[in-house]
Image (tube, grey):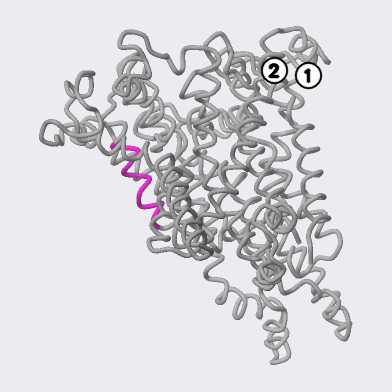
């Protein structure tokens, strides 16, 4: 009797575990499945509400992807996003990595306060800043230029990545630098030659995170950029594939899927580091 | 987690280094501080200045009008409705995110085959650009071709001729945008809580198992209290992302129907950029800032205080 109830309970637990995972996975991925299937559907199939929409009834069409790559500047937008992304990543690394180290090691009590202050700048959202920025960008003559985005995007990547790097450096044992300094390196030398090389994972996390933020950004790009050849993906796609009331659903869904998947794969490799940096900074 | 007590060690012994290090620290920090002051601090002050003026998109000159914009805002019903919507939107979605995030993190904590695949799939909503993910949902909620409604009709839940217009009916529209926000933020909260779970030492679970403590007691008296600091951090980020974001609402409902999903950040955008009234837009957008700062300080203090070492 005893073993049988135990077995039933264990079975129940396993089924429940599987059920929970299945439900959550469905919730999280259904929109992507939906994008995938919509991308390859013909338009007349999309608007036929009598047939089962979950599967393809006609052979998959490449027309939606053709519209995306031939009739819109999707390729150009991806290139723009990449250019802005690389430039912003470079600026962020140069600024945030030393700052994170300084906050983790070289500053005392006021460093703590400053770290919280840097975090608090994260609470000033683009929805507050884009109004003054639209004037600043105009006065600098940068409107409609990718450089406006390169200038402005570090305003949200730098605070966050400083915070991430600070958390990351705090997890590195001090002995490592102290040993290097006893061997005759200066503090800065120890930072460059010892700490940075063993922090590759943290730095890659910053790179990926910055790039994701750049790709996601919408409000600034919508406000500063008006000509189609300068758009980034997140603004170009909704602007050009929604014409009044006409939505090019197939192409929209394809566009979304193509940019999401590669980043998701990269992200998955670094998620643990990323989370560690995220939380250590806040708690310690 | 291992470096807690190191601070005390480095203080002693290297007097002559200290001066240098102070300056080095400042030097390494300076670029970040300058960037933040120039590109967050100054525009922020400019936003405050605008909110006290009568600047519009077209105007070149601006006049100081004191608190007029704020008075005008406080008189408008749309503002109060948006404030209420912001609170409902944030509280409900974050409550759901924390509860669901805990359940999902505990399910993912166990070892099973294909775990990396499940984690990869669950991270997708967080990684996809928000504007594009929201467009995916726009298509799912389509008034005519909604897949939810098709399934409902096929299962006989909805009548063949009448069905819900997800984004067109006040309460449903709010429920829909909350759902999309939960969808987007659940992955982040889950991975953060999962990291917290992994950092709980195994001996604690073992000790509880030896003492024969049941699942629910263990959950509420051991696991959740130990998770509290990290959950507060997850919650703080969730609140910040939700309150300051306008993309989900901009794409899905534009604040409609009848402003029932209008939140402060979207209202600021529509007033300031589309309506051209920069001053009032700035005033609206500034409204939640003091509240956010208070929430952040409270949460960070709580997180530090409740940390069990």
Asked if residue A52 lies left or right of residue B35, the reply is left
**Residue ID at (61%, 80%):** A194
Query: Which sits earlier in the primary sequence, circle 2 or circle 1?
Result: 1
Compared with residue A99, is residue B94 higher up or lower down, i.e. above or below? above
- Residue A193, by quadrant, is bottom right
Q: Are marks 2 and 1 on the same chain?
A: yes
Q: Quadrant of the N terminus of chain B?
A: bottom right
Q: Range of the magenta residues?
A: A254-265
Q: Is residue A96 visible?
A: no
Residue B162 drawn at (x, y percent): 36, 9
Residue B272 drawn at (x, y percent): 61, 18
For the residues labelled 2 and 1, the Cα–Cα distance comes to: 7 Å
**Residue ID at (60%, 60%):** B195
Answer whether labels 2 and 1 touch (C-beta < 8 Å).
Answer: yes
In this rendered view, identify the residue nearer to me: B187 or A16: A16
> Is residue B171 located in the magenta-colored stretch of the structure?
no
In this rendered view, identify the residue nearer to me: B187 or B56: B187
């Amino acid at each position: 009797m005893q073993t049988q109830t135990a077995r039933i309970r264990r079975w129940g637990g396993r089924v429940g575990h599987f059920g929970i995972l299945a439900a959550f996975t469905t919730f999280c991925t259904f929109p992507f499945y939906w994008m995938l299937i919509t991308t390859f559907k013909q338009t007349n199939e999309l608007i036929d509400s009598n047939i089962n929409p979950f599967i393809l009834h006609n052979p998959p069409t490449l027309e939606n992807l053709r519209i995306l790559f031939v009739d819109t500047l999707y390729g150009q937008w991806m290139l723009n996003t990449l250019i802005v992304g690389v430039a912003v990543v470079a600026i962020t690394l140069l600024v945030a990595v030393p700052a994170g180290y300084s906050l983790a090691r070289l500053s005392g009590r006021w460093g703590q306060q400053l770290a919280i202050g840097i975090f608090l700048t994260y609470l000033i959202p683009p929805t507050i800043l884009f109004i003054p920025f639209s004037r600043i960008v105009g006065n600098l003559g940068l409107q409609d230029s990718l450089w406006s985005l390169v200038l402005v995007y570090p305003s949200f990547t730098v605070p966050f990545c400083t915070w991430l790097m600070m958390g990351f450096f705090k997890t590195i044992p001090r002995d490592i630098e102290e040993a290097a300094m006893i061997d005759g390196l200066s503090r800065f030398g120890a930072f460059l030659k010892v700490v940075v090389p063993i922090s590759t994972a943290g730095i890659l996390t910053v790179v990926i995170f910055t790039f994701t933020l750049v790709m996601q950004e919408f409000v600034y790009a919508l406000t500063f950029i008006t000509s189609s050849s300068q758009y980034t993906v997140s603004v170009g796609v909704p602007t050009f594939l929604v014409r009044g009331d006409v939505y090019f659903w197939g192409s929209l869904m394809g566009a979304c899927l193509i940019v999401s998947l590669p980043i998701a794969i990269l992200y998955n490799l670094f998620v643990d580091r990323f989370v560690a940096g995220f939380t250590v900074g806040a708690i310690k | 987690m291992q470096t807690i007590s190191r601070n005390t060690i480095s203080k002693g012994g290297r007097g002559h280094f200290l001066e240098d290090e102070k300056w080095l620290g400042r030097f390494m920090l300076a670029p970040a501080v300058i960037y933040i002051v120039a590109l967050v601090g100054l525009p922020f002050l400019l936003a405050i200045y605008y909110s006290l003026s009568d600047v519009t998109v077209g105007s070149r000159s601006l006049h100081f009008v004191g608190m007029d914009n704020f008075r005008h805002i406080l008189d408008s019903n749309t503002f109060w409705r948006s404030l209420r919507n912001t609170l409902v939107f944030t509280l409900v979605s974050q409550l759901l995110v924390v509860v669901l995030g805990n359940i999902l993190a505990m399910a993912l904590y166990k070892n099973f085959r294909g775990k990396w695949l499940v984690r990869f799939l669950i991270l997708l909503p967080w990684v996809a650009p928000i504007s594009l993910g929201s467009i995916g949902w726009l298509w799912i909620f389509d008034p005519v071709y909604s897949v939810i409604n098709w399934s409902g009709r096929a299962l006989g839940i909805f009548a063949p001729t009448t069905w819900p217009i997800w984004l067109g009916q006040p309460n449903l529209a709010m429920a829909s945008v909350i759902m999309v926000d939960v969808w987007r933020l659940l992955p982040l909260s889950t991975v953060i809580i999962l990291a917290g779970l992994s950092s709980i030492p195994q001996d604690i679970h073992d000790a509880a198992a030896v003492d024969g403590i049941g699942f629910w007691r263990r959950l509420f008296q051991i696991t959740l209290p130990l998770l509290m600091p990290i959950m507060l951090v997850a919650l703080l980020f969730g609140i910040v992302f939700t309150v300051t974001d306008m993309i989900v609402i901009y794409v899905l409902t534009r604040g409609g129907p009848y402003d029932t999903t209008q939140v402060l950040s979207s209202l600021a955008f529509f007033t300031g950029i589309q309506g051209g009234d920069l001053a009032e837009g700035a005033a609206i957008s500034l409204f939640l800032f003091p509240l956010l700062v208070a929430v952040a300080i409270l949460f960070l203090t709580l997180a530090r205080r409740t940390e069990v070492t």
